[in-house]
Amino acid sequence: MNQKTSEKNNILTIGELAEVSGTRLTTLKYYTELGILPFSQSGKRLTRKYNKEEALESLEKIKELKEKRLTIKEIIGFFKE
């Protein structure tokens, strides 16, 4: 596998991220709008692309914080630090 193929496999659309993570599409859009799920680039027709590793890491952290019963404002604050 060459570097370009490897990089492409690490970049996901929001739909692909939803499928891989088991997270609802609307939830991913909400997290992106809040700025706690950053996207790495925008393609044609404003399609957001996510770095697979970074996105899954962020989603895992969000899940942990929610399990600790942090409010969405507190979670946003955590990511803004």
Image (cartoon, rainbow, N blue to C red):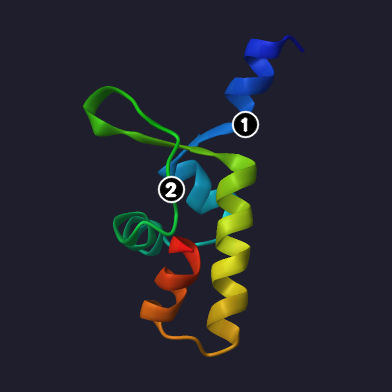
In the displayed structure, 57 sits above or below 62; it is: above
What residue is shown at x 41% (from left), y 70% (from top)?
76
Which residue is at the far bottom? 69
Q: How many marks?
A: 2
Of the residues under marks 1 and 2, which one precedes in the sequence? 1
Which residue is at the far right? 1
Mark 1, other Cα within 10 Å: few <14 / some 14–19 / many ≥20: some
Q: Return the mark for residue 10.
A: 1
In the displayed structure, 14 sits above or below 72; it is: above
Identify residue for label 2. 38
Which residue is at the far left? 45
- Seen in the image, is 40 located left or right of residue 32? right
Circles 1 and 2 in contact, beta carbons < 8 Å: no
User: Which dot, 1 or 2, sits closer to the camera?
Assistant: 2
**Corner quadrant of residue 25:** bottom left
Identified by mark 1, the residue type is Asn
* Local SS, label 2: loop
Identified by mark 2, the residue type is Pro
What residue is shown at x 53% (from left), y 50% (from top)?
19
Q: Position of residue 23 (x, y in %)?
A: 50, 62
Mark 2, other Cα within 10 Å: few <14 / some 14–19 / many ≥20: some
What residue is shown at x 69% (from left), y 20% (from top)?
6
Q: Position of residue 1 (x, y in %)?
A: 77, 13
| Along the line of sight, the residue nearer the viewer: 64 or 25 | 64
- Seen in the image, is 40 located left or right of residue 26? right
In the displayed structure, 16 sits above or below 79; it is: above
